[in-house]
Image: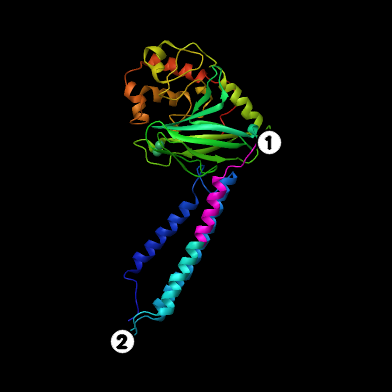
Protein backbone atom coordinates (compact mmCIF):
# COMPACT_ATOMS: atom_id res chain seq x y z
CA UNK A 1 0.00 0.00 0.00
CA UNK A 2 1.47 3.39 -0.93
CA UNK A 3 2.46 5.56 2.00
CA UNK A 4 0.19 8.51 2.81
CA UNK A 5 0.73 11.56 5.00
CA UNK A 6 -1.30 10.93 8.17
CA UNK A 7 -2.92 14.34 7.95
CA UNK A 8 -2.65 16.67 4.98
CA UNK A 9 -3.80 19.74 6.94
CA UNK A 10 -1.12 19.12 9.55
CA UNK A 11 1.52 18.80 6.82
CA UNK A 12 0.40 22.07 5.20
CA UNK A 13 0.38 23.91 8.53
CA UNK A 14 3.82 22.54 9.43
CA UNK A 15 5.27 23.62 6.08
CA UNK A 16 3.79 27.10 6.45
CA UNK A 17 5.27 27.40 9.95
CA UNK A 18 8.71 26.32 8.70
CA UNK A 19 8.57 28.79 5.79
CA UNK A 20 7.52 31.65 8.12
CA UNK A 21 10.35 30.83 10.52
CA UNK A 22 12.87 30.89 7.65
CA UNK A 23 11.58 34.25 6.37
CA UNK A 24 11.71 35.74 9.89
CA UNK A 25 15.29 34.54 10.39
CA UNK A 26 16.26 36.18 7.10
CA UNK A 27 14.83 39.49 8.40
CA UNK A 28 17.18 39.44 11.43
CA UNK A 29 18.85 42.71 12.36
CA UNK A 30 22.56 43.47 12.13
CA UNK A 31 24.57 41.06 14.26
CA UNK A 32 27.60 42.85 15.70
CA UNK A 33 28.92 39.69 17.36
CA UNK A 34 29.05 37.70 14.15
CA UNK A 35 31.94 35.41 13.26
CA UNK A 36 30.99 35.80 9.60
CA UNK A 37 32.62 39.21 9.17
CA UNK A 38 36.27 38.61 10.15
CA UNK A 39 38.55 41.66 10.31
CA UNK A 40 41.92 40.16 11.21
CA UNK A 41 44.19 37.44 9.83
CA UNK A 42 43.34 35.17 12.81
CA UNK A 43 39.59 35.65 12.48
CA UNK A 44 39.78 35.05 8.71
CA UNK A 45 41.71 31.80 9.27
CA UNK A 46 38.94 30.58 11.60
CA UNK A 47 36.26 31.76 9.15
CA UNK A 48 37.92 30.03 6.17
CA UNK A 49 38.21 26.79 8.14
CA UNK A 50 34.53 26.94 9.11
CA UNK A 51 33.54 27.48 5.47
CA UNK A 52 35.61 24.47 4.28
CA UNK A 53 34.06 22.32 6.99
CA UNK A 54 30.58 23.63 6.20
CA UNK A 55 30.81 22.66 2.52
CA UNK A 56 32.42 19.34 3.40
CA UNK A 57 29.43 18.71 5.71
CA UNK A 58 27.03 19.74 2.95
CA UNK A 59 28.71 17.28 0.57
CA UNK A 60 28.44 14.39 3.04
CA UNK A 61 24.83 15.32 3.84
CA UNK A 62 23.75 15.46 0.19
CA UNK A 63 25.40 12.11 -0.69
CA UNK A 64 24.05 10.26 2.36
CA UNK A 65 20.53 11.74 2.21
CA UNK A 66 20.18 11.23 -1.57
CA UNK A 67 21.22 7.63 -1.13
CA UNK A 68 18.75 7.25 1.70
CA UNK A 69 15.84 8.77 -0.25
CA UNK A 70 16.59 6.71 -3.39
CA UNK A 71 16.72 3.56 -1.24
CA UNK A 72 13.43 4.38 0.49
CA UNK A 73 11.59 4.62 -2.82
CA UNK A 74 13.47 2.04 -4.88
CA UNK A 75 13.42 -0.70 -2.25
CA UNK A 76 10.07 0.03 -0.62
CA UNK A 77 7.75 -2.84 0.23
CA UNK A 78 5.60 -4.05 -2.66
CA UNK A 79 2.58 -6.36 -2.56
CA UNK A 80 4.19 -9.35 -4.31
CA UNK A 81 7.54 -9.09 -2.47
CA UNK A 82 9.22 -12.29 -1.30
CA UNK A 83 11.57 -12.50 1.64
CA UNK A 84 14.93 -11.24 0.23
CA UNK A 85 18.15 -13.24 0.45
CA UNK A 86 19.48 -13.13 4.03
CA UNK A 87 23.12 -11.98 4.07
CA UNK A 88 25.56 -11.07 6.82
CA UNK A 89 27.78 -8.19 5.87
CA UNK A 90 29.65 -7.34 2.70
CA UNK A 91 33.40 -7.10 3.09
CA UNK A 92 33.94 -4.56 0.30
CA UNK A 93 31.23 -2.22 1.58
CA UNK A 94 32.44 -2.56 5.18
CA UNK A 95 36.01 -1.65 4.16
CA UNK A 96 34.77 1.29 2.06
CA UNK A 97 32.70 2.85 4.81
CA UNK A 98 35.55 2.51 7.27
CA UNK A 99 38.20 4.00 4.98
CA UNK A 100 36.19 6.89 3.50
CA UNK A 101 35.25 8.48 6.89
CA UNK A 102 38.85 7.94 8.05
CA UNK A 103 40.13 9.87 5.01
CA UNK A 104 37.60 12.66 5.70
CA UNK A 105 38.65 12.78 9.39
CA UNK A 106 42.35 13.00 8.41
CA UNK A 107 41.55 15.78 5.92
CA UNK A 108 39.65 17.73 8.62
CA UNK A 109 42.54 17.17 11.05
CA UNK A 110 45.13 18.51 8.58
CA UNK A 111 43.01 21.60 7.80
CA UNK A 112 42.33 22.28 11.50
CA UNK A 113 45.93 21.70 12.56
CA UNK A 114 47.31 24.12 9.97
CA UNK A 115 44.69 26.73 10.97
CA UNK A 116 45.66 26.35 14.65
CA UNK A 117 49.35 26.76 13.72
CA UNK A 118 48.53 29.96 11.84
CA UNK A 119 46.53 31.38 14.78
CA UNK A 120 48.95 30.36 17.51
CA UNK A 121 52.24 31.58 16.07
CA UNK A 122 52.54 35.29 16.74
CA UNK A 123 54.50 37.15 14.06
CA UNK A 124 57.80 38.67 15.17
CA UNK A 125 57.59 42.42 14.82
CA UNK A 126 59.62 45.40 16.05
CA UNK A 127 58.85 46.55 19.61
CA UNK A 128 56.96 49.64 18.40
CA UNK A 129 54.60 47.54 16.27
CA UNK A 130 53.25 45.49 19.15
CA UNK A 131 50.85 46.53 21.90
CA UNK A 132 50.57 44.39 25.01
CA UNK A 133 47.29 44.19 26.92
CA UNK A 134 46.56 42.15 30.03
CA UNK A 135 42.89 41.11 30.06
CA UNK A 136 41.42 40.25 33.47
CA UNK A 137 37.96 38.70 33.73
CA UNK A 138 35.88 39.66 36.77
CA UNK A 139 32.33 38.69 37.78
CA UNK A 140 30.95 40.37 35.58
CA UNK A 141 33.13 42.83 33.76
CA UNK A 142 36.47 43.06 31.96
CA UNK A 143 39.59 44.88 33.05
CA UNK A 144 42.25 45.89 30.51
CA UNK A 145 45.79 46.83 31.54
CA UNK A 146 48.43 48.21 29.18
CA UNK A 147 51.76 47.30 30.83
CA UNK A 148 53.83 49.38 28.38
CA UNK A 149 51.67 52.53 28.58
CA UNK A 150 52.21 54.42 31.82
CA UNK A 151 49.54 56.64 33.34
CA UNK A 152 50.09 59.95 35.13
CA UNK A 153 51.09 58.04 38.29
CA UNK A 154 53.65 55.88 36.45
CA UNK A 155 51.36 52.84 36.70
CA UNK A 156 50.13 50.74 33.75
CA UNK A 157 47.14 52.35 32.06
CA UNK A 158 43.95 50.61 33.24
CA UNK A 159 40.49 50.72 31.74
CA UNK A 160 37.30 48.65 31.90
CA UNK A 161 34.99 46.97 29.40
CA UNK A 162 36.29 48.98 26.43
CA UNK A 163 39.69 48.19 25.02
CA UNK A 164 41.23 50.45 22.39
CA UNK A 165 43.88 49.05 20.09
CA UNK A 166 45.74 50.48 17.09
CA UNK A 167 45.01 48.97 13.68
CA UNK A 168 47.90 47.32 11.86
CA UNK A 169 49.82 46.48 15.08
CA UNK A 170 50.17 43.06 16.61
CA UNK A 171 48.00 43.04 19.74
CA UNK A 172 49.52 40.66 22.28
CA UNK A 173 46.91 39.66 24.87
CA UNK A 174 47.58 37.93 28.17
CA UNK A 175 44.30 36.55 29.50
CA UNK A 176 43.63 35.80 33.17
CA UNK A 177 40.88 36.05 35.78
CA UNK A 178 40.38 37.55 39.22
CA UNK A 179 37.75 35.04 40.38
CA UNK A 180 36.21 32.22 38.33
CA UNK A 181 36.85 30.92 34.80
CA UNK A 182 35.68 33.31 32.08
CA UNK A 183 36.35 33.24 28.36
CA UNK A 184 37.53 36.15 26.24
CA UNK A 185 35.91 36.28 22.80
CA UNK A 186 35.72 39.03 20.17
CA UNK A 187 34.30 37.10 17.19
CA UNK A 188 35.32 39.67 14.56
CA UNK A 189 38.94 39.79 15.75
CA UNK A 190 40.04 36.46 17.20
CA UNK A 191 39.11 33.06 18.55
CA UNK A 192 38.18 32.31 22.15
CA UNK A 193 40.62 32.06 25.04
CA UNK A 194 39.82 30.95 28.59
CA UNK A 195 40.49 33.40 31.42
CA UNK A 196 41.58 31.15 34.28
CA UNK A 197 42.51 32.37 37.79
CA UNK A 198 46.27 32.06 38.56
CA UNK A 199 47.02 31.21 34.92
CA UNK A 200 48.04 33.33 31.97
CA UNK A 201 46.78 32.36 28.51
CA UNK A 202 47.97 34.10 25.37
CA UNK A 203 46.23 35.16 22.19
CA UNK A 204 47.08 37.73 19.53
CA UNK A 205 45.49 39.46 16.57
CA UNK A 206 46.31 42.21 14.10
CA UNK A 207 43.38 44.31 12.91
CA UNK A 208 43.22 45.40 9.29
CA UNK A 209 44.65 48.89 8.73
CA UNK A 210 42.53 51.99 9.33
CA UNK A 211 43.91 55.14 7.72
CA UNK A 212 44.65 58.21 9.85
CA UNK A 213 41.53 60.35 9.89
CA UNK A 214 39.17 57.38 9.35
CA UNK A 215 36.66 56.53 12.06
CA UNK A 216 37.55 53.88 14.64
CA UNK A 217 35.68 50.57 14.32
CA UNK A 218 33.94 49.00 17.30
CA UNK A 219 33.80 45.21 17.76
CA UNK A 220 31.52 43.56 20.28
CA UNK A 221 32.61 40.68 22.41
CA UNK A 222 31.21 38.47 25.09
CA UNK A 223 32.31 36.17 27.88
CA UNK A 224 32.00 32.70 26.37
CA UNK A 225 32.20 30.51 29.47
CA UNK A 226 29.35 30.31 31.97
CA UNK A 227 30.57 32.21 35.02
CA UNK A 228 27.51 32.87 37.18
CA UNK A 229 24.24 34.80 37.20
CA UNK A 230 25.31 37.65 34.91
CA UNK A 231 27.40 35.66 32.43
CA UNK A 232 25.15 36.90 29.61
CA UNK A 233 25.84 40.51 30.62
CA UNK A 234 29.59 40.20 30.66
CA UNK A 235 30.13 42.00 27.40
CA UNK A 236 32.98 44.11 26.15
CA UNK A 237 33.91 46.27 23.20
CA UNK A 238 37.15 46.58 21.33
CA UNK A 239 37.69 49.83 19.47
CA UNK A 240 40.19 49.51 16.63
CA UNK A 241 41.53 52.98 15.84
CA UNK A 242 44.07 54.39 13.42
CA UNK A 243 47.56 54.60 15.00
CA UNK A 244 47.25 58.37 15.52
CA UNK A 245 43.78 58.10 17.13
CA UNK A 246 45.08 55.34 19.38
CA UNK A 247 48.05 57.52 20.40
CA UNK A 248 45.65 60.35 21.22
CA UNK A 249 43.35 58.02 23.16
CA UNK A 250 46.16 56.48 25.21
CA UNK A 251 47.55 59.93 26.01
CA UNK A 252 44.13 61.18 27.16
CA UNK A 253 43.38 58.00 29.10
CA UNK A 254 46.74 58.13 30.89
CA UNK A 255 46.03 61.55 32.30
CA UNK A 256 44.41 62.20 35.68
CA UNK A 257 40.64 62.61 35.69
CA UNK A 258 39.37 65.83 34.10
CA UNK A 259 37.55 66.56 37.37
CA UNK A 260 39.45 65.59 40.51
CA UNK A 261 36.99 66.99 43.04
CA UNK A 262 35.09 63.94 44.24
CA UNK A 263 31.47 64.60 45.23
CA UNK A 264 30.90 64.05 49.00
CA UNK A 265 28.75 60.94 48.45
CA UNK A 266 31.58 59.24 46.55
CA UNK A 267 33.52 58.95 49.79
CA UNK A 268 30.60 58.93 52.26
CA UNK A 269 28.83 56.00 50.56
CA UNK A 270 31.96 53.93 50.08
CA UNK A 271 32.50 54.19 46.29
CA UNK A 272 36.19 54.88 47.02
CA UNK A 273 36.58 51.43 48.53
CA UNK A 274 36.12 49.68 45.17
CA UNK A 275 36.72 52.22 42.41
CA UNK A 276 39.69 54.31 41.38
CA UNK A 277 39.62 57.81 39.91
CA UNK A 278 43.17 58.83 38.99
CA UNK A 279 44.20 62.10 40.59
CA UNK A 280 41.91 61.65 43.61
CA UNK A 281 42.14 59.61 46.79
CA UNK A 282 39.87 56.96 45.22
CA UNK A 283 42.15 54.01 44.48
CA UNK A 284 39.97 50.89 44.88
CA UNK A 285 40.72 47.97 42.58
CA UNK A 286 37.74 45.65 43.18
CA UNK A 287 35.52 47.46 40.69
CA UNK A 288 36.15 49.09 37.33
CA UNK A 289 38.51 52.09 37.19
CA UNK A 290 36.28 55.15 36.67
CA UNK A 291 38.92 57.75 35.77
CA UNK A 292 37.49 58.44 32.30
CA UNK A 293 34.04 56.96 32.85
CA UNK A 294 32.32 59.58 30.68
CA UNK A 295 34.27 58.44 27.61
CA UNK A 296 32.80 54.93 27.66
CA UNK A 297 29.97 53.79 25.42
CA UNK A 298 28.25 51.55 27.94
CA UNK A 299 27.87 50.95 31.67
CA UNK A 300 27.69 47.72 33.67
CA UNK A 301 29.82 45.82 31.10
CA UNK A 302 27.71 46.50 28.05
CA UNK A 303 24.37 46.11 29.85
CA UNK A 304 23.20 49.69 29.23
CA UNK A 305 24.16 52.64 27.04
CA UNK A 306 26.13 55.21 29.00
CA UNK A 307 23.65 58.09 29.43
CA UNK A 308 22.19 60.01 32.41
CA UNK A 309 18.91 58.04 32.53
CA UNK A 310 20.61 54.64 32.56
CA UNK A 311 23.31 55.71 35.00
CA UNK A 312 20.59 57.03 37.29
CA UNK A 313 18.76 53.68 37.13
CA UNK A 314 22.00 51.80 37.77
CA UNK A 315 22.95 53.82 40.88
CA UNK A 316 19.40 53.75 42.17
CA UNK A 317 19.06 49.96 42.10
CA UNK A 318 22.08 48.07 40.75
CA UNK A 319 20.51 44.79 41.79
CA UNK A 320 17.50 45.43 39.55
CA UNK A 321 19.64 46.33 36.52
CA UNK A 322 22.14 43.50 36.98
CA UNK A 323 21.02 41.05 39.64
CA UNK A 324 23.76 39.56 41.79
CA UNK A 325 26.48 42.04 40.78
CA UNK A 326 29.10 42.86 43.42
CA UNK A 327 28.12 46.53 43.76
CA UNK A 328 24.59 45.60 44.77
CA UNK A 329 26.00 44.08 47.98
CA UNK A 330 27.06 47.61 49.04
CA UNK A 331 24.52 49.78 47.24
CA UNK A 332 20.99 48.73 48.20
CA UNK A 333 17.85 50.27 46.75
CA UNK A 334 17.80 53.03 49.38
CA UNK A 335 21.52 53.52 50.01
CA UNK A 336 21.75 56.62 47.83
CA UNK A 337 19.28 59.50 48.14
CA UNK A 338 17.93 61.04 44.87
CA UNK A 339 20.16 64.08 45.46
CA UNK A 340 23.23 61.88 45.91
CA UNK A 341 22.40 59.95 42.74
CA UNK A 342 22.07 63.22 40.78
CA UNK A 343 25.40 64.38 42.18
CA UNK A 344 27.15 61.13 41.21
CA UNK A 345 25.59 61.04 37.73
CA UNK A 346 26.74 64.59 37.04
CA UNK A 347 30.22 63.87 38.33
CA UNK A 348 30.75 60.54 36.55
CA UNK A 349 29.51 61.80 33.19
CA UNK A 350 31.82 64.81 33.48
CA UNK A 351 34.81 62.44 33.44
CA UNK A 352 35.28 62.60 29.68
CA UNK A 353 38.70 63.67 28.40
CA UNK A 354 37.18 64.58 25.06
CA UNK A 355 38.10 62.19 22.27
CA UNK A 356 35.09 61.47 20.11
CA UNK A 357 34.99 57.80 21.00
CA UNK A 358 31.30 57.06 21.21
CA UNK A 359 31.62 55.10 17.97
CA UNK A 360 29.18 52.38 17.08
CU1 LIG B 1 32.42 35.62 32.54
CU2 LIG B 1 30.84 34.15 31.53
Circle 1 sits on which residue? 211
Q: Position of residue 31 (x, y in %)?
A: 51, 44
Q: Residue at x 32, y 84 (%)?
A: 86
In this picture the colour scheme is rainbow
Identify the main secondary structure in magenta: helix
Identify whether 189 is placed above or below 299.
below
Alpha carbon of mark 1 to alpha carbon of mark 2: how far? 75 Å
Identify whether 71 is placed above or below 152.
below
- N-terminal of the pair, mark 1 or mark 2, is 2
> Regarding mark 1 in the picture, which secondary structure is present there?
loop
Q: Quadrant of residue 73?
A: bottom left
Residues marked 1 and 2 touching at CB (< 8 Å): no
Q: Can residue 44 be seen? A: yes
Q: Can residue 57 be seen? A: no
Q: Quadrant of residue 303?
A: top left
Q: Position of residue 350 (x, y in %)?
A: 52, 18
Q: Position of residue 112 (x, y in %)?
A: 51, 55
Q: Quadrant of residue 265?
A: top left
> Regarding mark 2 in the picture, which secondary structure is present there?
loop
Q: Split into 4 quadrants, where in the image is the N terminus?
A: bottom left
Q: Residue at x 37, y 62 (%)?
A: 14
Identify whether 52 is placed above or below 238.
below
Q: Split into 4 quadrants, where in the image is the C terminus?
A: top right
Specify whether residue 108 is painted magenta: yes
Circle 2 sits on which residue? 83
Determine the residue located farthest toward the right in the rendered image: 212
Specify whether residue 99 is painted magenta: no
Extent of the magenta region? 107-125
Q: Position of residue 151 (x, y in %)?
A: 55, 20
Amino acid sequence: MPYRWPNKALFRRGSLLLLTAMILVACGQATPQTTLNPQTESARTIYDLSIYLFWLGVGVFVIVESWLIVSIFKYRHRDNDQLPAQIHGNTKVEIAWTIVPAIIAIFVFVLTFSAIQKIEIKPQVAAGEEVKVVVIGHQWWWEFRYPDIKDANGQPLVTANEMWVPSGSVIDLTITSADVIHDFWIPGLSGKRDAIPTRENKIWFRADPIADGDKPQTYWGQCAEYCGTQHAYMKMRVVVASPSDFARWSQEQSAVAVNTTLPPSFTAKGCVGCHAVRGTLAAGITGPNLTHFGSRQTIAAGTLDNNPTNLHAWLDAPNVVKRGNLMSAAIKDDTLSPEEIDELVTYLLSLDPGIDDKQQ
